[in-house]
């Protein structure tokens, strides 16, 4: 942190440095200066002649940024160049201090991933950062005054990495040096943690207490870039009247009002926003978005996916074989929409290649991918191919998290399921758990899909009930479709044997099989219970045991299938071949014939 003089922000110290004549001149010019920059003036007769009282009057009447802009302009006219230089020196110190805080935070949050993933993502980050730079520099002068740039991408598509890349490049002076004096990162977690407050605690959460330079940051709001991460998770209200919005950075208001005041530029007028969201948050995006705003999609294109496979496998023949398998399988293709899930897929396929397996036969479902991924990572470097961390603990953590809507786990949560500190370090090295990017001292699975598969395994293991501490008091939710689908997949004898052999465990299948059979056959003729059969077909597709499929689907006399994408089409086509007694089929199709 840059060193500062205690007098830097002490208005009385500045006033005491003025001669009697200069003090008189300052009081005379206050009214005119206020009018020039659009502030309400304090009547001349009400201004105190004593410096301590005057300093208190001005500090109480004006927000800090307006007060120091006033003083700076008047000091220039008196003229007191030395006082102006002192204010400039303070402002420059605080700009550099802010950059140092960002660098420190980025270093602490840095997640070490395998070098291949790191190289690929670095290229992707630089590409998008350059696009941001172009957008902010080349939009029209009128539009740039309140520009919002939206970055839309699926979970784990790289939005957080891109934002941190932009922060890193700016903090090191590589981009926007002449454009933004301050880049302020706000996450949905930061916002949702506060029920009410003013702008100060929200934007100075990383500054040492009492050192926040609110006056300097807000002195030029047009040189502020707010980065708002995960807009779709922010608790917003779109029924706030203009009169309820906040215009004073000191005012305590509810968080929905504070965020709305920022987005409408009632606070920090002229600032700009870089906002990320997932596709499901589009209704919120469209509500906020203006005609002059920009929208960018973060997509994992065919070319990028091919490049990733080439980097991972190094051997061109292997890379092409794995890539073509993914291209021909709609489920795998959808899975590989995010870099980290591309890595999971590559790890799984590489394991099968190393064992000399025929990929077309050995990897057909998502269960195959997750089974081989866990088998490879959890037995890596282990003697006798036994898991090097407790599988039961990992799966128990995953299940408890999903049942209690918890994706971020405390160290106490990890201990409660039986993990030691050494286990946690190992899981990070194996890249199954990562430090949370939003919550200090918390951990999360590398992707929710990996957590969902581990949760499915938990239902099939003889586990003790733990109940993670951070989830106490929350209501349990319903089992998610991916968990049920993975349970169906693990009932397949071949896949189950692969899992049990690699991880040295025994999956309890009898009661799970009976439960799923009973529920599925019940749903076969009870459409009111589930609306349509597509989720069930996804589970049955994961199983792919002919006798089991016939056993269940023989009971279907009618089917209602909702096809939203190519995955649904692939799964439904496969399963309908087993519906020998089907009499009625209702098929709803949406958007799948559009050009991909």
Image (cartoon, rainbow, N blue to C red):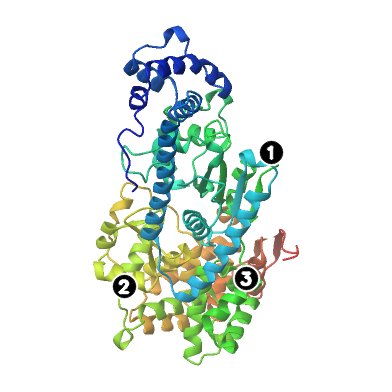
Q: Which residue is drawn at 64% across and 42% down?
A: 144
Q: Which residue is drawn at 39% across and 69% down?
A: 432
Contact between labelled residues 3 and 1, with CB atoms less than 8 Å apart: no
Task: Report which residue position mark 1 lands on.
Answer: 142
Give 94 or 282, whichever is nearer the viewer.
94
Q: What element carries label 1?
A: loop
Q: Distance between the residues labelled 1 and 3?
A: 50 Å
Measured as percent of width and height from the top left, residue 147 is found at 62, 42
Q: Residue furthest bottom?
A: 356
Give 451 or 30, whichever is nearer the viewer.
30
Q: Quadrant of residue 35?
A: top right
Measured as percent of width and height from the top left, residue 526 is found at 58, 57
Contact between labelled residues 2 and 1, with CB atoms less than 8 Å apart: no
Q: Quadrant of residue 140?
A: top right
Q: Residue 103 bears which disc, if any?
A: none
Q: How far apart are marks 3 and 2 (CA)?
A: 37 Å
Mark 2 nearby-residue class (10 Å; few <14, some 14–19, many ≥20) = some
Task: Report which residue position mark 2 lands on.
Answer: 426
Q: Is mark 3 on a helix, strand or loop?
A: helix
Task: Report which residue position mark 3 lands on.
Answer: 571
Sequence-first tag of 1 and 3: 1
Sequence-first tag of 3 and 2: 2
Sequence-first tag of 1 and 2: 1
Q: How far apart are marks 1 and 2 (CA)?
A: 53 Å
């Amino acid at each position: 942190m840059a060193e500062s003089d205690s007098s830097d922000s002490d208005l009385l110290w500045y006033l005491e440095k003025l001669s009697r004549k200069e003090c008189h001149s300052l009081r005379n010019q206050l009214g005119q200066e206020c009018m020039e920059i659009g502030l309400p003036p304090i009547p001349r007769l009400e201004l105190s002649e004593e410096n301590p009282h005057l300093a208190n009057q001005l500090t109480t009447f004006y927000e800090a940024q307006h007060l120091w802009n006033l003083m700076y302009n008047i000091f220039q006219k008196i003229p007191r160049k030395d006082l102006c230089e002192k204010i400039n020196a303070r402002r420059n110190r605080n700009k550099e201090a802010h950059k140092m805080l960002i660098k420190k935070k980025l270093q602490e949050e840095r997640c070490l991933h395998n070098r291949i993933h790191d190289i690929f993502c670095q290229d992707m980050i630089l590409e998008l950062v350059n696009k941001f730079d172009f957008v902010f520099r080349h939009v029209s002068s009128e539009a740039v005054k309140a520009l919002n740039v939206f970055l839309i991408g699926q979970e784990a598509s790289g939005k957080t990495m891109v934002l941190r890349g932009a922060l890193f490049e700016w903090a090191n002076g590589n981009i926007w040096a002449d454009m933004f004096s301050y880049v302020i990162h706000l996450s949905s977690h930061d916002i949702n943690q506060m029920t009410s407050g003013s702008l100060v605690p929200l934007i100075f959460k990383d500054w040492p207490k009492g050192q926040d330079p609110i006056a300097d940051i807000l002195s030029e709001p047009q040189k502020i870039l707010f980065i708002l991460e995960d807009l779709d998770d922010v608790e917003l209200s779109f029924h706030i009247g203009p009169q309820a919005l906040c215009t004073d950075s000191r005012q305590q208001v509810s968080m929905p009002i504070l965020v709305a005041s920022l987005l409408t530029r009632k606070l920090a007028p002229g600032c700009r926003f870089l906002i990320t969201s997932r596709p499901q948050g589009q209704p919120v995006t469209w509500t906020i978005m203006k005609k002059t705003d920009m929208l960018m999609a973060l997509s994992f294109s065919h070319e990028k996916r091919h490049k990733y496979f080439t980097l991972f496998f190094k051997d061109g023949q292997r890379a092409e074989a794995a890539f073509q398998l993914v291209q021909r399988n709609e489920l795998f293709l959808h899975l590989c929409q995010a870099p980290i899930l591309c890595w999971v897929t590559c790890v799984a396929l590489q394991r099968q290649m190393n064992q000399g397996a025929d990929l077309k036969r050995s990897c057909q479902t998502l269960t195959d991918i997750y089974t081989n991924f866990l088998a490879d990572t959890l037995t890596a470097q282990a003697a006798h191919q036994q898991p090097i961390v407790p599988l039961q603990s990992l799966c128990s953590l995953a299940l408890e998290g999903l049942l209690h809507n918890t994706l971020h786990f405390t160290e106490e949560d990890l201990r409660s399921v039986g993990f030691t500190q050494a286990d946690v370090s190992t899981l990070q090295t194996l890249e199954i758990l990562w430090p949370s990017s939003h919550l200090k001292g918390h951990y999360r699975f590398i992707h929710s899909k990996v957590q969902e598969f581990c949760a499915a395994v938990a239902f099939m293991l003889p586990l003790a009930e733990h109940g993670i501490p951070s989830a106490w008091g929350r209501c349990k939710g319903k089992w998610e479709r991916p968990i049920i689908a993975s349970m169906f997949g693990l009932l397949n004898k071949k896949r189950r044997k692969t899992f049990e052999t690699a991880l040295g465990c025994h999956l309890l299948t009898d009661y799970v099989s009976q439960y799923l059979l009973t529920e599925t056959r019940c749903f076969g003729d009870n459409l009111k219970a589930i609306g349509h059969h597509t989720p069930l077909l996804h589970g049955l597709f994961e199983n792919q045991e002919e006798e089991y499929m016939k056993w269940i689907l023989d009971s279907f006399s009618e089917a209602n299938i909702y096809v939203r994408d190519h995955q649904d089409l692939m799964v439904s086509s496969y399963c309908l071949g087993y519906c020998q007694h089907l009499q009625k089929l209702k098929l709803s199709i949406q958007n799948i014939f559009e050009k991909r």
